[in-house]
Image (cartoon, helix red, strand yellow):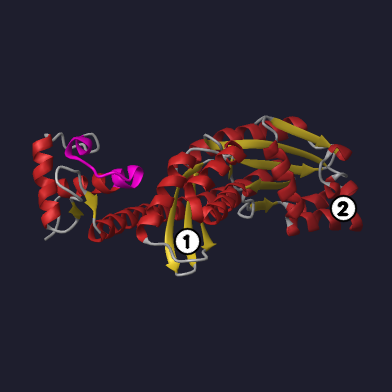
Amino acid sequence: MELDERKMKILQAVVRNYLETGEPVGSRTISKYTDLNLSSATIRNEMADLEDLGYIVQPHTSAGRVPTDKGYRFYVDCMLADKEKEVEDMKEMLLQKSDKLDDMLKEAAKVLATNTNYATMISSPRYHQNKLKFLQLSRVDADHLLAVIVTEGNVIKNHIIPMCEELDDETLLKLNLLINTNLNGLSVEEINLAMIAALKKQAGIHSDIVGNVLDAVSDAIHADEDLEIYTSGTNNILKYPELSDKERAGELIHAFEEKRPLTELALDSLANESTGIQVYIGNESPIESLRDCSVVTATYELEDGIRGTIGIVGPKRMDYDKVVGTLKKLRDQLDDLYKKG
C-alpha cells in the first residue's frame, strides 16, 4: 500500500523525533511536528494504520510509537531521494550558470584589453567567508562514506570518508542529524575546538568519522583549486619599448601563460577586505615577475560574498585615469550581467 501525504508526514515526524530523543513518540508530540493541523485523535488513527502496515510499533500499552526497520527504510529512501534531487537540480543550474559566467568573463577580459591596450586578467569568483549550507552522508560500500558538502553559493564538493566498520541506517541518520544540526550556517572559523570536541563526544565510537567529515568540510570551504584566470591582450606588452626587451617580455608573457603568478595576485586582492581599486607601481607589486610594470586591480562582487579580481598590467606610464575609470565601469556592470544571465 502506497502511503498518502498525511501518513508520510506523520511517519517522517515519528522517525525524526525518535532519532533526536530516543523516546517513543506520541500523537501530541507529532501534532507539533507536522503542518497538517490535525487533531491528536486523527493522528492516533493514522499512527494505528502505520502500525498495521508495519512502519511503526508500540513498545508497550499506552506508550508512543517507535519506527520499525521498514519505517527507517522508508525514511532513508525518501530523505536520500529528496537530497539527491536537490543536489542534481543544483548541479544542473550551476553548470548552466557556470558556462554563462565563463563566457562572460572571457569576453570581459577581451573587451578590457581592447579598450585599454594593456594586458588584462579576470579571476573566477570565490565565496568570501564561506559557510556550510548542508551536508549529506551516504554509504558507498562497507568501508567508505560519501560526504556531499554544499556551501554558500550552492557550491558542491564530494569527499570519500573511510570507515573502520559499516554503519547501519539508524547510525548514519543520527550522524547526518548531528552534523547538520550543529554545523549548518557556520564558517570554518566558527567551528572551534570546543564544538569539535562536543560533536566527537556525542558521536561516541564514531568520533573518528566525525573528525574526517570536519576535515572534509574545512577542505571544501577553503578550496582554491577551482580559481580560474581568464587573460587577454598579452601581446599588448610588446607595444611598449620598456617592456619589450627579450628578458622582461619573456617573464611577463610566461606569467600570463603559466597563470600561477596571476592566481597569487587575485588571491592577494581578494584577501583585502576592501572592494576598491588597488594600484601597484613597480616594486609595490606583490608579484616578483610584475615589478617592472604597473598593476591595477579591482574586486568585483556578483552577489553577497561572491567575489573575484579584475587586473590590468601595463607600463609604469600607463593612462591611470582611463584604466581606473574602465575598471570601475566593468566592475559595476558585471553584477547586472551575471543576474541577467
Residue 98 spot, x, y in % from top left: 50, 52
Q: Quadrant of the N terminus?
A: bottom left
Tell me whether the residue at label 1 lies in contact with that at label 2, contact meaning CB atoms closer than 8 angstroms: no
Asked whether the viewer can see residue 236, the reply is yes
What residue sits 59% from the left and 41% below the top? 188
Q: CA distance from mark 1 to mark 2?
A: 52 Å
Question: In this rendering, would 156 be left or right of 224?
Answer: left
Mark 2 = which residue? 244
The mark lying in front, picked from 1 and 2, is 1
Q: Main secondary structure of the magenta part?
A: helix
Q: From which residue to which does the magenta span run?
A: 16-31
Give the amino acid type for the residue marked by disc 1 in the picture. Answer: Leu
The mark found on residue 146 in the picture is 1
6, 56: nearer the viewer: 56
- In this rendering, the answer to whether 308 lies above or below 176 is above
Answer whether residue 24 is magenta in the image. yes
In the picture, which quadrant includes the C terminus? top left
